[in-house]
Amino acid sequence: MKTSLLTTALFVLTTLQCVVAQQIPGLQFSNYGGLYRSTYNPSVLGGPRHKFQINVLTLGGSIKYRYFRFIGENSFLYPVLAPHSTKELYGRSRTMGSLTYKDPIFLTGEIRWPSVSFAIGKYHGVAVQLRTRGFVLGRNIPAAIDNLYMKRLDTGSTPQLSIEAWGNFSLVQQSFSDLSFSYGAQLLDIEGHKFRAGVTVKRVFGARVAYLKGNADRYSINPVSSTEPDINQLEIDNLTYESGYSTPNRKMGLGNLFDSGKYGSGWGYDLGFSYEIGSVWKGRKEAYNDSPDYLVRIAGSLTDIGSVKYKTSDSRVVRGTHSDVVVRQTELETISDRGPEGFMSLFPGDTSSAFAQKVKLPQALNLEADLQVFHGFFLNLSHTSRFKSRSGQTLDMYVPNTFIITPRFEDEDSGLSFPISFIQGNNRPSIGLAGHFGPVFLGFSNVNGLMKSGGARGSMMYIGFTAWKASRKKDKD
C-alpha cells in the first residue's frame, strides 16, 4: 500500500467515497471559520472577518483506532481509491470506523481542495470552493458479519455461528465532487443587532454509485472442513439480490469527469442566515477591536439541496437468486477490492440492465444557537436533521440526525473546541477535540470512540492548512 502522494491526490480529486454532509469540528461554528463555516452556513461571508482566506488543503475521514497502525500507508483513503483501483482495498477499509452504532454502518470523508474567499467591501463576501465527498452506507449488516470482515475468516478469530435469521440489507458506495460559488451579505448592522444571509450554488460532477441490496433468509459461520477448524466460511441461504454500478472501476482521467456518459452530474444549493443579538462589551470595546460582540447568535441553514442524475453509457444492474451462497476469505477480499463487479463475477445474475436514476444529495436542515459566555468563550447548541428524506430510496445520500453541544475558545489566530455529539441511534455521546493554531488545524469528532470498546468506534479526523489576512480596524489613537 505504497501509493505515491501524487497518485493519491489524483485519485482523491473525484473519488472520495465516504463524506456526506461533513463539517469540520469547531470551525463550522467559529466566527473565524470563514471558508470552513461557509459550507455549513454561507451567511458567514456577509460582513466577513477576513479580507481573504485560502484553504491550502484539508483532508478528512472516519477512522478507527486501527488506522494509526497504518498511518503512513494511505489507509484512511480506502474510500478514495475504490472507483479507480482494486489494490488492497480490503486492508485499507478495515482501518475505517463507523460514526453510527451497529445499524446503519456509516463511513464518511472529505477532501477540500485549494479554495478561496475574499471580502467585497465591509458587508459582502464571496467564495469559490472545490470539494470531493462520498460515503459508504450499510443497512442491516449483522454484527457477526461485520466482525468476520474485520477479523478475517482464516485467522481463527471469527467465532462459529449457528443458523441466524437475516432479512433485507443494503450496502451503498457513493462519491462526487462539487465546484461551488458562495455569496454572503450583512443586511443589518446596528448596535446589538446584526443580520446576515448567504447562498451557495454548486455544480456536482464526477459522481459514481455502486451498490448491493437484497434479502437473505438465514446465514451461518462454519468451518471449511473438520481438519481446518480455524478456517471458516460464511454460508447464506436463499439470497435474492440486485447489484449495480453507474460506471465500472476504471483508471481516473480528468477528461472523463465532466462526461455525463461516464459519470453522474447535477446541481445543488445552500441557503443560510444568522442573527446576532446583544453585546458583551457594554460600550467598553476599543474602536480597533473587531472580535465578536454578540450575546447570542441564532442561525439556520439548508445544505446540499439538489440531486445527481445518472444516465451513463456503461452502467450495469444485475439481479439474481441463489439458494446456497458460500463466501470464504478469498471471495470476501474479491468483493471488497472490486465492489459490485467482484460480486457479479462470483455470483452471476439472472437478468442484466442499465442503471439510470436520480439520487438526492445529503440534504440537511441545520439549526444553531451560539452563546458568548464571556469574551472569547462560546457555548454552541446545534441540531442537524435529514431534510425531505424519501422512504425506501436506499441510494439517496444519507446524513445522520445529530445534536451537538460545543464549548469553544476562539480568537483570530487560534481556537480550541470540545464538540459533544449525540447521534441518533448511538448508545453514548461522541466527545471530540479540535484545535486551530495559526495556519494548521486538527480535529477529532469522537476521541472516546478511538479508545473505548463498544459503541460507535469511528471518529472523523480532519487536518488542514489555511492562510488569511484579517479585516482589522485601524487604531487611530
Image (cartoon, rainbow, N blue to C red):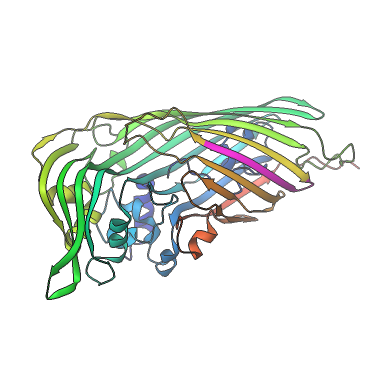
Quadrant of the snapshot with the C terminus: top right
- In the drawing, does residue 465 fall left or right of residue 60? right
Q: Is residue 143 above or below residue 211?
A: below
The residue segment tinted magenta is: 374-384
**For the point 43% across and 35% down, which residue is it?**
362
**For the point 20% across and 57% down, which residue is it?**
220
**Residue 24 visible (yes or no):** no
In percent of width and height, residue 135 lies at 38, 45
**Residue 291 visible (yes or no):** yes
In percent of width and height, residue 90 lies at 28, 60
**For the point 71% across and 48% down, which residue is it?**
412
In percent of width and height, residue 22 lies at 48, 44
Q: Is residue 455 above or below residue 393?
A: below
Q: Is residue 103 above or below residue 272?
A: below
Q: Which is nearer the eye, 410 or 367?
A: 367
Q: Is residue 386 above or below residue 95?
A: above
What is the quadrant of residue 439 in the picture?
bottom right
- In the drawing, does residue 371 fall left or right of residue 139? right
Q: Which is nearer the eye, 474 or 395?
A: 395
Q: Which is nearer the eye, 248 or 297?
A: 297
Q: Residue furthest bottom?
A: 227
Quadrant of the snapshot with the N terminus: bottom left
Q: What main secondary structure does the magenta stretch of the protein show?
A: strand
Residue 375 within the magenta-colored segment of the rendering = yes
**For the point 82% across and 40% down, which residue is it?**
280
**Picture mark count:** 0
- In the drawing, does residue 211 fall left or right of residue 57? left
In percent of width and height, residue 116 lies at 55, 41
Residue 109 within the magenta-colored segment of the rendering = no
Q: Residue furthest top?
A: 187
